[in-house]
Image (cartoon, rainbow, N blue to C red):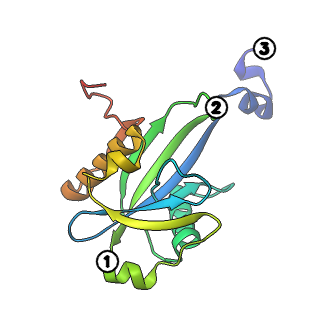
């Protein structure tokens, strides 16, 4: 049966599946970006954020995740990056990840205001580009460089697993 003749529910069920995540890029005046260490794994750091809940918009999800994870009630700013991540070998479907400007934070403000959710996060750190390769997976390093560039230039980046689609190094 062609898609035009399927009932809507059947047609939608036949389409590819994807998940959506959102996060916030909090940064200081020196361009360092706040990363968090998940308490449930010891092999990587992350950007504050997570998966969207049913019916939630990416901007709302970023705001909710930052409040849940860091105890900060902030209104995310403009969209910095959208990263389309292919399906994982572990069965994870395709992921669309939206990253918003979380605003500027001084180290003193961060120490005063951040309250980590201990079930999810064990620590936070303001980090520069020289630290990212030690703390993050390669696609996350590329993603953070795109976020830093978007912050500096006022642009928005569209990525494929951290790469600009037209990047010759891909």
What residue appears at the point 40 percent right and 44 percent down from the top-left corner? 140
What residue appears at the point 27 percent right and 63 percent down from the top-left corner? 32
User: In terms of secondary structure, where does tag 1 sit?
Assistant: helix
Q: First in sequence, mark 1 or 3: give its number.
A: 3
What residue appears at the point 51 percent right and 47 percent down from the top-left corner? 43
User: In terms of secondary structure, where does tag 3 sit?
Assistant: loop
Few, some or many residues within 10 Å of mark 2 (<14, 14–19, 20+): few
Give residue 94's position: percent from left, percent from top. Answer: 57, 34
Q: Disc number at residue 159? A: none
Task: Locate the C terminus and report the quarter of the image it occupies.
Answer: top left
Looking at the image, can residue 139 be seen?
yes
* For residue 155, side relative to residue 83 (left or right): left
Which is more foreground, mark 3 or mark 2?
Answer: 2
Position of 140 relative to 33 (above/below):
above
Rendering quarter of residue 78:
bottom left
* For residue 95, side relative to residue 80 (left or right): right
Q: Disc number at residue 107? A: 1
Task: Locate the N terminus and report the quarter of the image it occupies.
Answer: top right
Q: Disc number at residue 90? A: 2
Give residue 126's position: percent from left, percent from top. Answer: 34, 66
Seen from the viewer's position, the closer of residues 117 and 168 is 117
Q: First in sequence, mark 1 or 2: give its number.
A: 2
User: In terms of secondary structure, where does tag 2 sit?
Assistant: loop
Seen from the viewer's position, the closer of residues 77 and 92 is 92
- Residue extending farthest to the bottom is 112
Give residue 73's position: percent from left, percent from top. Answer: 50, 78
* For residue 7, side relative to residue 24 (left or right): right
Q: Disc number at residue 1? A: 3
Q: First in sequence, mark 3 or 2: give its number.
A: 3
Position of 48 relative to 161 (above/below):
below
Give residue 42's position: percent from left, percent from top. Answer: 54, 52
How many numbered discs, if any?
3
């Amino acid at each position: 049966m062609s898609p035009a003749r399927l009932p809507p529910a059947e047609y939608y069920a036949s389409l590819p599946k994807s998940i959506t995540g959102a996060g916030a890029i909090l940064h200081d005046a020196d361009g360092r970006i706040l990363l968090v260490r998940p308490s449930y794994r010891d092999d990587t750091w992350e950007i504050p954020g997570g998966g969207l809940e049913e019916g939630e918009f990416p901007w709302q999800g970023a705001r909710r995740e930052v409040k849940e994870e860091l105890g900060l009630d902030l209104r995310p700013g403009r969209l910095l990056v959208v990263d389309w991540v292919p399906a994982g070998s572990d069965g994870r479907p395709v992921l669309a990840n939206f990253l918003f400007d979380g605003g500027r934070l001084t180290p003193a403000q961060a120490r005063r205001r951040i309250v980590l959710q201990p079930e999810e996060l064990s620590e936070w750190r303001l980090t520069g580009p020289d630290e990212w390769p030690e703390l993050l997976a390669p696609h996350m390093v590329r993603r953070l460089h795109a976020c830093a560039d978007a912050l500096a230039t006022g642009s928005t980046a569209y990525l494929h697993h951290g790469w600009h689609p037209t990047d010759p190094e891909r």
